[in-house]
Image (cartoon, rainbow, N blue to C red):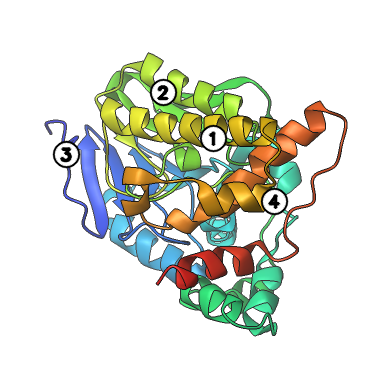
Amino acid sequence: MAVNSHAPYEHGLHEVADGVFAYLQPDGGWGWSNAGLLAGDWSSLLVDTLFDLRLTRRMLEEMDAVTAGRPIDVVVNTHANGDHCYGNGLLVEAGAQVVTTEAAAAEMGAVPPSALEALLHADLGEPANRYVHEAFAPFDFAEITEAGGVPEPDRTFSGELQLDVCGRTVELLEVGPAHTAGDLLVHLPDASTVFCGDILFIGGTPIIWDGPVANWIGACDAILGLDCEVIVPGHGPLTDDAGVLAVRDYLAFVEDECRARHAAGQTAEEAIAEIDLGPYREWGEWERIVANVHAVYRELAQAEDRVHEPPRNIFGAMAELKYGAG
């Protein structure tokens, strides 16, 4: 089958290269992540699971026509955020091995499904309650907890790891800490395809949970260096080098604004209030500028051997910016 590097941004499974599929979930906002599949002659590899068991079951059902006779025996998690690993249990039950970076494995237990379930039932006040429910109420975290939670990965690595899927090489390239502590890229050289996890948000705003920003910018450069025809982001439609550059430019913009404002003596809150997002204001979840400014200010404080205190409720701070702006 010919490469379909411009698959429409429609829900479901899209073959993007020979035996390579992207599973897309519009609109790509909070929790609506993408996944991937490499189908070999007698077995398959899955890139990421979804935010709950119901969604992951649906995805696996849609993949059945491809994976029948060549079951998924390896799952690669691009990082530790729940919308990329909370469905792992279904694959582990079926005998699959889970692979990720050492840093991602260490981070997976930090925010278990029970924590998000508790967040949905917490009294955070308005507008935080509204924001959290809009973001996370569509997902069923309780079922994951009842099923025993998210199993620990079976195999971890640092740096680079090569896997073989029925004679096809899969390169796992660690690029974190960036979005999270242990981000990785899944590169399929013979298909000119790369699955980028949340190093790429296309049409939505990246969020810096970890950093440093320089590492994330370096990860974008690494993607460009692979010179792939098919680039699958963690959220949003398939993209090309222009999409990678847009993410890179946003990160550089945030870092430059923060460094200049920090040097001028502005607090993080003052910077957030005054930064003009320009065209980035049109991206989904633009209010993530709150988390991103605090992440850069934290980085700057660490360089000065100080401690930067972010808001106790980062979702509440984002909610106030979003809804307050009308």
**In the depicted structure, whether residue 264 falls above or below residue 82:** above
**In the depicted structure, whether residue 37 falls above or below residue 191:** below
Cα separation between marks 4 and 3: 32 Å
Return the residue at label 2.
Answer: 223
Looking at the picture, how far across and down is residue 20, in whole percent?
A: 29, 37
Which quadrant, please, contains the N terminus? Answer: top left
Cα separation between marks 1 and 3: 34 Å
Q: Are marks 1 and 2 in contact (CB under 8 Å)?
A: no
Return the residue at label 3.
Answer: 6
> Picture quarter containing residue 123?
bottom right
Return the residue at label 1.
Answer: 257
Q: Residue at x 56, y 63 (%)?
A: 318
Q: Earlier in the sequence, mark 3 or mark 2?
A: 3
Q: Are marks 2 and 4 in contact (CB under 8 Å)?
A: no
Label 1 is placed on what type of residue? Glu
Task: Count all numbered tags in the image, as a single digit.
Answer: 4
Return the residue at label 4.
Answer: 108
Q: In this rendering, does residue 210 appear at all?
A: no
Q: Label 2, secondary structure: give it.
A: helix
Looking at the picture, how far across and down is residue 125, in whole percent?
A: 65, 83
Q: Residue at x 16, y 39 (%)?
A: 6
> Label 3: few (<14), some or many (≥20) within 10 Å?
some
Label 2 is placed on what type of residue? Ile
Closer to us: mark 1 or mark 2? 1
**Left of 221 or right of it: where is 106?**
right
Label 3 is placed on what type of residue? His
